[in-house]
Image (cartoon, rainbow, N blue to C red):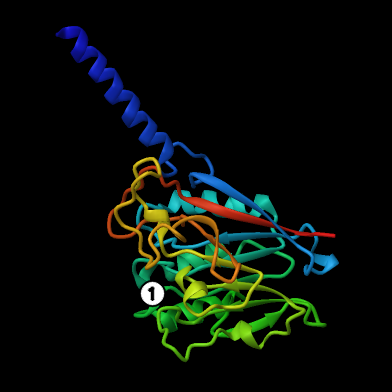
């Protein structure tokens, strides 16, 4: 009997150790669980953007489980990555008192093409304060608009103001972009790209937290998406073949816990396919 108890105890220890390593940034010196890298190929990408690196973070919910110490580490890591562009996907703070502290830190990440952002559902009650904080720090907030990254309009970035306000008449701002232009769409929730059939070459989104808690990816009780596991995390495609990258996010919401769904910085490298 003592041998059986010993075996059970060891198995339990291994199980909980696996959860610890697979969860948040507990053991990370970067402040997040991982740097998640994607390579995106396209014949439509302008030659000037071949090799361009885009850093993307979302759902910070500062501070939640994402403490001040971790914020400093993440910002330092973003600077070390030296991306050509930084994108912010919404859900920034848990209270107004943290707005200036968060955006003061994020503003220290400098990049060639600048920092672009959209708002999330947690910004509805503090929209004005966050918009003002971004404006003062040179962060460009995209509200149902398209910004050209080159003067000839061959590559652009678009952002959605409220991706939860969708009906049969909703049209993505990317629908007005020339067919020849390479388009990056920044939107808080991945559901938007599928629901409105949004034209884009790549969509970057958050909101789901990857489920935040999962049993080794086999079962995720809370998904925060109407499409089940389809756009829950990672890179997936809409019905019209648009690639959607959904990040696990940085912070936590509701419960300050992550299990088997590590927080992450997403780094997308664009490549021109010949």
Q: Which residue is mark 1?
A: 121
Which quadrant of the view contains residue 142? bottom right
Screen quadrant of the N terminus = top left
Q: On the picture, is 19 further left or further right than 12?
A: right
Locate residue 15, reporting x and y percent: 33, 29
Q: Is residue 189 visible?
A: no
Locate residue 116, reporting x and y percent: 60, 72
Residue name at image x 32 percent, y 31 percent: 16
Which quadrant of the view contains residue 14? top left
Residue name at image x 73 percent, y 84 percent: 178
As helix, strand or loop, the secondary structure at mark 1 comes to helix
Q: Is residue 94 visible?
A: yes
Q: On the picture, is 150 further left or further right than 75?
A: right
Screen quadrant of the C terminus = bottom right
Task: Specify the farthest residue to the left.
Answer: 1
Locate residue 119, reporting x and y percent: 47, 75
């Amino acid at each position: 009997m003592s041998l059986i108890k010993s075996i059970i105890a060891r198995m339990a220890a291994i199980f909980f150790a696996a959860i610890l390593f697979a969860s948040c940034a507990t053991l990370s010196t970067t402040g997040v669980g991982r740097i998640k890298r994607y390579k995106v190929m396209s014949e439509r990408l302008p030659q000037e953007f071949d090799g361009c690196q885009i850093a993307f973070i979302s759902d910070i919910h500062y501070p939640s489980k994402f403490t001040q110490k971790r914020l400093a580490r993440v910002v330092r890591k973003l600077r070390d990555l030296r991306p050509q562009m930084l994108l912010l996907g919404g859900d920034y703070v848990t209270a107004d008192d943290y707005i200036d502290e968060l955006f003061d830190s994020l503003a220290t990440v400098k990049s060639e093409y600048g920092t672009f952002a959209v708002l999330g559902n947690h910004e509805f009650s503090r929209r004005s304060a966050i918009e003002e904080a971004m404006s003062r720090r040179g962060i460009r907030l995209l509200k149902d608009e398209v910004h050209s990254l080159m003067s000839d309009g061959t590559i652009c970035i678009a952002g959605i103001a409220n991706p939860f306000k969708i009906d049969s008449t909703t049209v993505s701002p990317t629908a007005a972009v020339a067919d020849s232009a390479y388009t990056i769409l920044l939107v808080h929730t991945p559901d938007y790209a599928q629901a409105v059939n949004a034209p884009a070459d790549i969509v970057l989104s958050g909101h789901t937290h990857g489920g935040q808690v999962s049993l080794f990816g086999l079962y995720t009780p809370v998904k925060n998406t109407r499409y089940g596991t389809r756009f829950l995390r990672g890179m997936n495609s809409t019905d019209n073949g648009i690639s959607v990258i959904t990040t696990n996010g940085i912070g936590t919401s509701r419960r300050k816990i992550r299990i088997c769904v590590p927080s992450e910085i997403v780094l997308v490298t664009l490549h021109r396919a010949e």
